[in-house]
Amino acid sequence: MARKRSTDEGDELLARLGSLTAQARDVQGHNIEAAAFMGQVRAGLRALASVTGEPGELLARTNDLLLSLRSDLFATCTFMRLDPATGVLESARAGHIPFVWATADGKSGVVDDEGGPPLGIEPGVEYPVTRHRLTTGGVFVLLTDGVVEGPSLNIEDGLDQVVRLAGIAAVAGLATHALAAAVIKGAESVGHDDDAAVLVVGLDGPGTPP
């Protein structure tokens, strides 16, 4: 069974066909224009997700859509799709910080993927898809850089902090909402008031019935 918990309900999508899709987004700026642009990003992703659930293609189509709006802003995004029945995880990243993973057998880390540029900057971009097959339960933590980077904390140390928390949660079987709360609590150490959002996806194990 797959479970999700977010500190911002706008940062998640539950898709069709029994697969779980999740996204984390961030946008340049903090004014009304940026908020409106984020709304366009959200709407574009939702609309295009009804056409394709393949993460790389979804980001590429969203990128082209945003460019057609001729905005001066850009957005970053991580989009992932998880099939709880098979344990197959697919993800693609557009200028966003990588997500953190941890499994019940004690392994944890930051996903090693190629990624691509932010959305709304360069036309015709292809976003590589990273695929993994999970053989045990675990958690995935998607977040914005405001959670792990700031004047008082560099991004490497911030991600290491999340890796430690995720590793403890995965081994102990903690609830996704507890891990999300712990990660967002850690954001208090970054030294600024930038937007901070966390989305935790938990998998009990491939093929586990709901």
Image: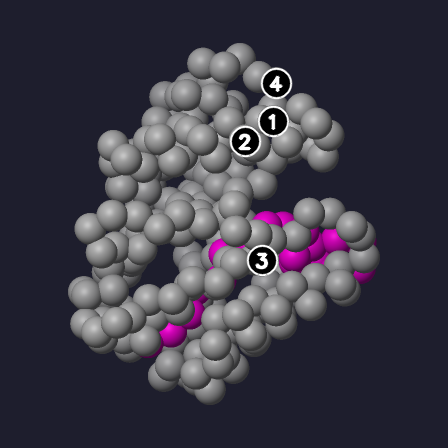
- Residue identified by numbered label 1: 36
Q: Nearer the viewer, mark 4 or mark 2?
A: 2
Q: Do the residues under discs 2 and 3 have CB atoms within 8 angstroms?
A: no
Q: Position of residue 196 (x, y in %)?
A: 66, 52
Give the mark nearest the N terminus, 4 or 1: 1
- The secondary element bearing badge 3 is classed as loop
Marks 4 and 2, how far apart at CA: 15 Å
Question: Earlier along the polypeptide chain: callout 1 or callout 3?
Answer: 3
Residue occupying image coordinates x 81% and y 57%: 191
Find residue 61 and report its horizontal and vertical position in percent: 35, 27
Q: Does any portion of residue 130 appear in the rendered image?
A: no
Is residue 60 left or right of 157 when viewed as pictured?
Answer: left
State the residue position of label 3: 7
Residues packed near mark 4 inside 10 Å, few (<14), some (14 to 19) or many (20 plus): few
Q: Secondary structure at mark 2?
A: helix
Counting residues from the start of the chain, the first of labels 2 and 3 encountered is: 3
Q: Quadrant of the N terminus?
A: bottom left
Residue type at mark 2 is Gly
- Residue at the disc numbered 2: 39
Q: Residue at x 73, y 30 (%)?
A: 31
Q: Amino acid at mark 1?
A: Ala
Disc nearer the start of the sequence (4/3): 3
For badge 3, the amino acid type reads Thr
Q: Is residue 187 left or right of residue 16?
A: right
Q: What type is the residue that disc 4 sits on?
A: Asp
| CB-based contact (under 8 Å), mark 1 and mark 3 | no
* Residue 82 position by quadrant: bottom left
Q: How dense is the environment of label 3, judged by Cα within 10 Å: few (below 14), some, or many (20 and up)?
A: some
Q: Secondary structure at mark 4?
A: loop
Q: Which dot marks residue 72?
A: 4
Q: CA distance from mark 2 to mark 3?
A: 17 Å
Marked residue nearer the N-terminal end (4 or 2): 2
